[in-house]
Amino acid sequence: MDIHIYDRILKLRALRNYEKRAVSATHVDQLIEAARWTGSSKNRQNWSFIVVDDPQQQIALADAGDFTDPVRNAPLTIALVQEPEGYEFDTGRLAQNIMLAADALGIATCPITLHRDEVAAKVLGLPQDRRCRYAIAVGYPAESAEPANFGGRKPVDEVRFRNSYGR
């Protein structure tokens, strides 16, 4: 077992403060490649990605959600588009792969929910049969970047059951 990778997974946190510099094209390509290789239901890969780096476009996209300051503050946002017959479960897998790949590259990320799908669709110019409910704010971590402190994790005995709920 590669303890280093396991340790990185346990320590992955959303960061919301970024340097002002642009994310390099090489890093963007690497993040999209990591996303592209994410597993999906029946290997359908019913997704696409919109890399948003225009500040005005990011502000407009941020208006599609309620807690979207990371999108306003990041130099880049990756919008995760659910294609026809796509699954939200697969979109969650995409988000986690992007976040883990970014962490490996020294890049900070924060997952974002876009609560108003219709606003996100209009901002992104999506066809009617596409949906963008989630995005990832991306940037190099600012020196002051610290994960939000929402407390640790629940004890394992509160979340793990065997064979049926509550046991």
Image (spheres, grey):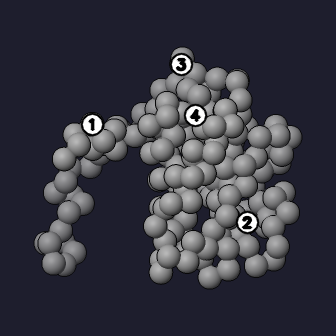
- Residue at coordinates 26% horizontally, 49% vertically from top-left? 154
Q: Nearer the viewer, residue 134 or 69?
A: 134
The answer for how far apart the CA atoms under marks 4 and 2 are is 22 Å
Q: Earlier in the sequence, mark 2 or mark 1?
A: 1
Going from N to C along the chain, the mark reached first, 2 or 3, is 2
Q: Earlier in the sequence, mark 1 or mark 4?
A: 1
Look at mark 1 in the image and give the residue it sits on: 4
> Please, is residue 123 above or below residue 30 in the view?
below
Q: Identify which amino acid the numbered label 2 is placed on.
A: Asp
Quarter-wise, where is residue 11 in the image?
top left
Q: Using the rendered image of the protein, determine whether residue 17 is visible from the camera's viewpoint.
A: no
Which residue matches tag 2?
A: 117
- Amino acid type assigned to the residue bearing label 3 in the image: Ser
Three-letter residue code for mark 1:
His
Q: Secondary structure at mark 2?
A: helix
The residue labelled by disc 4 is: 16
| Residue mark closest to the camera, 1 vs 4 | 1
Residue at point 15%, 78% (across, down): 163
For residue 104, which quarter of the picture? top left
